[in-house]
Image: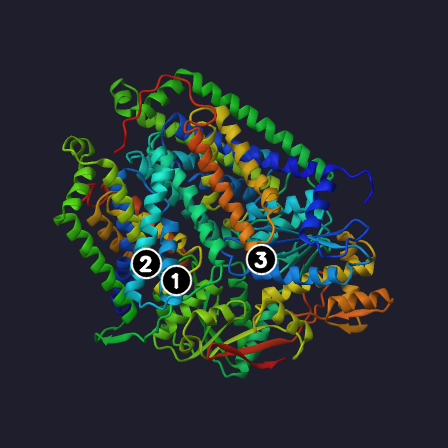
Amino acid sequence: MPMSLNRRGLLAGTAAALAAPSVIRAQAEPIRLGALNPLTGAGGPYGPSMRKAIEGIVEAVNAAGGIGGRRVQLFGEDTQTNPDAAVRAARKLIDVDRVAAIMGTWASAVTTAVAPLCWESRTMLFTVSGADSITQLPHRGFIIRTQPNSSLQITKLAEFLGERGARNIFILAAQTPFAEPNRVILEREMPKYGGRVAGQVIYDRDKTVFRSEVDQALRARPDYIFLNGYTPDVTIILRELFRAGWTGGKVAPAYAVNQRLLDSLPAEVTNGTVTWAPSPDVESPAFKRLQALLGTNDPDPYSCQTNDHASLACLAIARAGAATGEAIREHVRQISQGGGERVTDVVEGLRLLREGRKIDYAGASGACDFTDTGDILTCPFRYEIAEGAKLRTLRIA
Amino acid sequence: MLSDLIGELPQLLVNGLVAGTILALPAIGFTAIYAVLRFPNFAIASHATMGAYAGYVANVWLGLPVIPSLLAAFVVPALSGMACDEVVLKPLRRTGPLTAAIAAVALTIALENVIRFVFGNDLRGYDLPVWRDWRFDLGFAVLRVGPQQVENAAISVAVMAMVFLFLAFTRTGKMMRAVADNPMLAGIKGINADTVARLGSFMGMGLVGVGGMLLGLDTSIDPLTGFRAVLSVFAAAVVGGLGSIPGAVVGAAVVGVGEELSLLVLDASYRTAVGFLAIVVVLLVRPRGILGERAF
Amino acid sequence: MENYLVAMAVFAGLYGLMALGLNVIWGMAGMINLGLVGFMAVGAYTSALLTVRHATWPIPLGILAAVLVTATAGALVARITARMRGDYLAIVTLGFSEVVRLVAANEIRFTNGTDGISAIPGPWRGEVAPATFNLIFLGLTALAVLVVYLVCQRIRHSPYGRVLRAIRDDDQVTAVAGKPVLRFKTEAFAVGAAITGFAGALYGHYNAYIAPEGFVPLITIYVVLALTAGGTGTNAGAVVGAVLVVAFMEGTRFVVAAIPGLAAVQIAAVREFLIAALLILLLRVRPQGLFPERHIRHPVPDPR
């Protein structure tokens, strides 16, 4: 380390040494990355495993000698699922820790609040937020979003529901920025398959009882109910549907009906619930590694995505040979798409890049190919069905 | 249209009453603490969550059935409520009731995070079968009623009955009422205000804890379980009259039914607002709530 | 680091403004207001809607409109709640702020719903470097705090302020003395709400983005704690308390980062616990706040 260490550098260095004593102490200044996840508040059920998925990649990279001999140092903060708190946390990551990228923001309000800070300070922002408006911000390329936008997501859902013969779909939606766009797109898409949207109830997801909302849905006599919410509220509604004697179809995003939800409800309540999410190929090694890392058979889609955020950031930095937000922005598409050797592991990717080869990364969340505005291009989706408190893959298409 | 309305009404009323009975226990707890200590103890949110988790540990980790688990859901928050009041809030009440109320908010954030530290954020469910609803054909409408909800409501009513019997017939209960009605007079009569205060926190937070577990039986639990219900609980207590225990029951029914009936005219996403509209309407007519502030 | 400190100073200033507003309502006139964040939201939305979504007014006009609208809202709330006692007022105002949040989330055509409003203009934002913008805004915020502070000091030491304090200490006696208590209460509430709305408008122009989820009761709690910790009734206490609260919120980040062997969620839990515990501790050590009001107080009778 240089002799002209200031106090901040000394502190950071000490913290780094404390955090990873077993890792090779790189000679150069570490590469700084930020994780900004919902650890408390409404996003709390998701944040911790999103963070672990990031930490796993950073540990793997450091264990393999870092990037170009430089260690990766991860700085973590909590969004508290609140834009006000998230902005302050992002300021700290950007101005104090001087991170090159912020990874894993959840909740559209949080992401939209943090985004201007990122593009103004030329910091890359990787997010899982679903609202369409996010990639329409004037972000100058500094946003990559791994969650498919409404259009892609719902088109895929409509296609699948159409094939399963759904004719009359009712939507029970938590109040989120994507609730309305999702309905509009489903209404546009379903007629192509001879179906329609029978109606929608938008509910307040802070309530604890949704009996009457479920009654409203049942009165429309649908054959499928689309549960467009998050785990806490979807748990309550699934139980309510069972009690009401509902035997028709149930479909929900995979982040809502995840393994934790299945574990917290009796199997007969969840049986038959269909989920869908963007997906890597069958038998994807990246997905398998994440399963092992998180100790679960079914890592939720958000964790798959943040796992890829970290891999993409590391590979782009390696490709660029510089650890800045701009370097990531310029090079992230060069390692994630456009041909080259197929890579699913960040460490292998780093090795190939060292050898001067071109790579095309595909991770636990899917192909990771992005449009110019930062949205994911079309990708395969995984359709699963809950059976006996486990998810069984129906198909990947 | 009108026949639709008539068809929906009975179901909404039943749903509202069921929701009201669950709301009633924490509302009684909140109002009982108010009656004895004369400040709104906003720490009920985390104590409801604590009750839900205590019940969860008893039910899932120790394998106890629901009823004994409810005892855990009472005792743990009751002890915590008493201890927190003694250590944190009591010294602040001398500065003024609102300082204590505000410290109680900070306290609830602190306790929520103790729970988060120990249990994490993952959703947890009780070890409990789920039954299909019973259906009753009324001719103009089909009514569905859930066995679990009936059981929860029955538990809630039974606990309420115990509270009323305790306050009406035991010496300690009478002491508590005396302090609530007139602390000065009670003091002259030689009732130890400190003992009664501790008892008030113990019983109040215990009831809040049981309410939290009943809530959890019907949903799933995480560190925000109590927080989600707390606004409706405040509304119920205020509508009924802060400090009035029968008032809390009436207020819970009003808020429970009101939130359901509002679905006829308002979007479901406005439901949280209903409790507060109820407060404003009731307080404009009766500034001390429906039943006033006499404790009992 | 400098940039971060500047940004946090802006946040402290905005919280300080709200604490000053609360001090007029609560500290001087004795009405608790747990709906502070609701007025902040009304101010932020008014100015944002007028400068970017529904019109393109210049920022100062938007802020002026925000002040007027929140003053009106404050007067209305005060009229409706005039007869309510403290504890009721606490819960009703809390409800008011939740209703504001729900309206902002649900009336999509008017407010853009949960998507929020982005690209709210800020003074010279985009024309100067982000760090310079930050400094400019800090200057503006400091100026705003100073002006509002002086106005509040003026109110406090004027005969008007004495009437407010008299109402706080005993409104019946004040009424008997021939003061129009309701009018004073309404005006105090309106002034306090207007200051809060002013802070809200600045907040929107600083962050460039507002959304309903940003206006949760937690912000009210922080401001109330700031005022209580600083010293209810004193304007200096309001400002110092706000600085202290922001220092707690930010300082804890660096403290918990040094704890080894904990999962991320546990670190987050420790941090929120610490913030709450520090505030409780401060209340315990100095129940009257760091800057207690200096005047003869009759001891408050033990509430039990």
Q: Work out whether residue B287 can be spotted.
A: no
Share a chain, discs 1 and 2? yes
Mark 2 or 3, closer to the camera = 2
> Residue flagged by tag 1: what amino acid is it?
Val
Could you give the CA–CA distance between mark 2 and mark 3, rounded to whole angstroms? 36 Å
Name the mark nearer the viewer: 3 or 1.
Answer: 1
Mark 2 — on which chain does it sit?
B
Secondary element under disc 1, as helix, strand or loop, is helix
User: In the figure, A175 relative to B34: above or below?
Assistant: below
Q: Position of residue B142 (x, y in %)?
A: 26, 74
Badge 2 local density, few (<14 within 10 Å), some, or many (20+)? many
> What amino acid does circle 3 point to?
Trp
Q: Quadrant of the N terminus of chain A?
A: top right
In this rendering, the answer to whether B124 lies above or below A89 is below
- Alpha carbon separation for disc pair 1 and 2: 9 Å
Q: In the visual, does B254 lie left or right of A230?
A: left
**Residue B236: x %, y % from top left:** 29, 50
Q: Is residue C186 left or right of residue A328?
A: left
Name the residue tied to disc 2. B72
Q: Position of residue A108 (x, y in %)?
A: 57, 56
Q: Residue A106 carries which label?
A: 3
Q: Residue beneath label 1, please?
A: B57
Q: Which residue is nearer to you in this view: C251 or A194?
A: C251
Q: Where is residue C41 in the image (x, y as percent from the top left)?
A: 49, 42
- Spatial separation of the CA atoms under disc 3 and disc 1: 30 Å
Let me know if marks 2 and 3 both belong to one chain: no
Contact, mark 3 vs mark 1 (Cβ under 8 Å): no
Q: Is mark 3 on a helix, strand or loop?
A: loop
Q: Quadrant of residue B124?
A: bottom left
- Are dots 2 and 3 in contact, CB under 8 Å? no
Q: Nearer the viewer, residue C84 or A363?
A: A363
